[in-house]
Image (tube, helix red, strand yellow):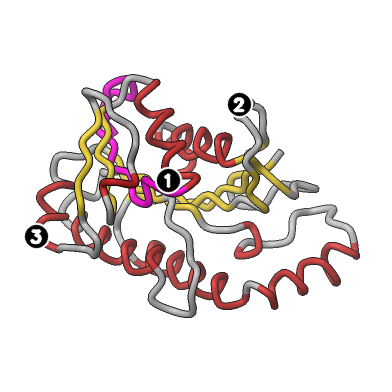
């Protein structure tokens, strides 16, 4: 990625809870931000370093041209349905658009249950809570597994960040990261701190082509 202090960042899912936090924090850090949105009316932020681009569905040519001027892509999109969710569809489109730009950073939100059980997790968590959550959100997690598989098979400089339950707690900047695993006894994180983590890993070469667990 280019100089971290002057990066050009494209944000997917920019009007969602996490995506909007990414936009706000990236602007506050001095970055130039392009927000890809389905409905520009849902983006209340106005800033001289913010460009809002309407793209309800991936447009291959427009996306390739846009990402050709981008240093990094951050996806705050969630998997919400069985197959073909925005997270999976857009990830495939972005990978295709970045086929000739393997150094462009791509960071995407996944979910902690997609990753392994952290070391030291309790029997209750391993054998009761985790299977229960997995059944309730089975379709979403399967979709995120497909998204992660597509990233692993592609040539991009990707990172997936796997949070547990998301909250609207104010940002603290204090949380734990585990590269290649999940956070032990980490059961929640605020969207503001998740956004902070997404931007943080952009400049960390140790997270390239790795999954990163994040939690309080």
The residue depicted at 33 percent of the width and 25 percent of the height is: 4
Above or below, 187 against 28 in this view is below
Q: Nearer the viewer, residue 87 or 117?
A: 87
Give x and y (percent) for residue 177.
63, 39
Is residue 182 magenta-colored?
Answer: no
Q: Write the residue at 23% across / 25% down.
A: 49
The reply to whether the C-beta atoms of the residues labelled 3 and 2 are less than 8 Å apart is no
Q: Which residue is mark 3?
A: 61
Q: How far separated are the C-alphas under marks 1 and 2? A: 21 Å
Looking at the image, is mark 3 or mark 2 earlier in the sequence? Answer: 3
Q: For the point 58% across and 35% down, which residue is it?
A: 193
Quick one: label 1 or label 2, which is nearer the N terminus? 2
Give residue 189's quadrant in the image: top right
Residue 173 - label: 2
Q: Is residue 71 left or right of residue 140?
A: left
Q: Where is residue 137 drawn, in percent x and y?
A: 63, 72
Q: Does the magenta portion include 6?
A: yes
Q: Is residue 66 left or right of residue 179?
A: left
Q: Which is in the foreground here, disc 1 or disc 2?
A: 2
Position of the N terminus by quadrant: top left
Label 3's element? helix
Reading the image, the residue beneath label 1 is 208
SS state under label 2: loop
Q: Which residues are magenta?
A: 1-16
Between the C-alphas of marks 3 and 2, the distance is: 37 Å
The reply to whether the C-beta atoms of the residues labelled 3 and 1 are less than 8 Å apart is no
Q: Which of the pair 49/94 is nearer the observer? A: 49
Looking at this rendering, what residue extends furthest in the right direction?
123
Assign a secondary structure to mark 1: loop
Neighbour tally class for label 2: few under 14, some 14-19, many 20 plus, Cα within 10 Å: few
């Amino acid at each position: 990625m280019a100089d971290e202090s002057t990066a050009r960042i494209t944000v997917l899912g920019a009007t969602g809870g996490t995506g909007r936090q990414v936009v706000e924090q990236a602007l506050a850090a001095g970055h130039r931000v392009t927000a890809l949105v389905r409905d520009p009316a849902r983006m209340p932020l106005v800033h001289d370093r913010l460009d809002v681009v309407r793209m309800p569905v991936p447009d291959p040519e427009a996306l390739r041209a846009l990402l050709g001027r981008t240093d990094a892509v951050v996806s705050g999109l969630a998997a919400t349905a069985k197959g073909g969710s925005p997270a999976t569809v857009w990830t495939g489109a972005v990978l295709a658009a970045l086929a000739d730009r393997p150094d462009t950073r791509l960071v995407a939100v996944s979910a902690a249950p997609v990753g392994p059980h952290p070391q030291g997790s309790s029997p209750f968590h391993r054998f009761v809570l985790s299977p229960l959550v997995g059944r309730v959100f089975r379709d979403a997690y399967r979709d995120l597994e497909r998204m992660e598989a597509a990233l692993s098979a592609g040539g991009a400089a990707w990172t997936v960040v796997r949070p547990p339950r998301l909250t609207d707690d104010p940002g603290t900047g204090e949380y734990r990261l585990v590269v290649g695993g999940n956070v032990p006894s980490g059961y929640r994180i605020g969207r503001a701190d998740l956004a902070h983590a997404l931007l943080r890993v952009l400049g960390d070469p140790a997270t390239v082509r790795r999954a990163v667990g994040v939690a309080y």
